[in-house]
Image (cartoon, rainbow, N blue to C red):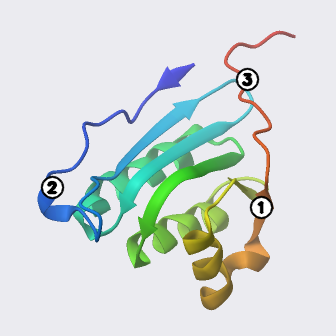
Amino acid sequence: MDDVNSRPPATPVGAGESGEVGSVHVMVGPVQTRVVLSGEIDAGIAPELRDAAADAEAAGRPVEVDARHVRFMDSSGVTLLARLAARTPGRLRLIQPPDVVRFLLEVTRIRDLIDVVDGDPGFAEDDKS
């Protein structure tokens, strides 16, 4: 497994309402790519979100987004989800999104492009075939 997009959290200037800084990490496995989001997903980490999307696209594998630790999301996060849904193979899978993310999926109507799962399907780190 390669963690191609582990970046330090954004500066507190980009923190949302709670002041919790957001982070994004990309893990590329043998059969899928996982993007892990946590904290405040907002304009303060927009460059990191763009880089994560580019890394996931370049991997050429189906993508799942682990959103269970997201505390806030604005249009920057929605843009990431829409981009991944449109530009990566298969249907985008969103793992355990909190209510704030589910609300945005419905309001923006991108819910139809994404499979929401309430449990973690696990992440294959090694090719065991």
Between circles 2 and 1, the one closer to the viewer is: 2
Q: Secondary structure at mark 1?
A: strand
The Cα atoms of the two marked residues, 3 and 2, are separated by 33 Å
Q: Secondary structure at mark 2?
A: helix
Between circles 3 and 2, the one closer to the viewer is: 2
Q: Tag 1: residue type?
A: Val
Position in image of residue 88 (x %, y %): 65, 55
The Cα atoms of the two marked residues, 1 and 3, are separated by 19 Å
Residue pointed to by mark 3: 124
Q: Earlier in the sequence, mark 1 or mark 3?
A: 1
Q: Quadrant of residue 60?
A: top right
Which quarter of the rendering shows the N terminus?
top right
Which quarter of the rendering shows the C terminus?
top right
Q: Quadrant of residue 45?
A: bottom left
Residue pointed to by mark 1: 116
**Residue 12: which numbered mark, if any?**
2
* Nearer to me, 27 or 41: 41
| Location of residue 106 with respect to 79 vertically, above or below | below
Position in image of residue 81 (x %, y %): 56, 66
Characterize the local packing of mark 2: few (<14), some (14-19) or many (20 or more) Cα atoms within 10 angstroms: few
* Nearer to me, 57 or 122: 122
Between circles 1 and 3, the one closer to the viewer is: 1
The Cα atoms of the two marked residues, 2 and 1, are separated by 30 Å
**Which residue is drawn at the image coordinates 48% and 49% (left, top)?**
37
Q: Tag 2: residue type?
A: Pro
**Which residue is drawn at the image coordinates 73% and 23% (left, top)?**
124
Q: Tag 3: residue type?
A: Ala
Position in image of residue 11 (x %, y %): 14, 51
**Which residue is drawn at the image coordinates 67% and 47% (left, top)?**
64
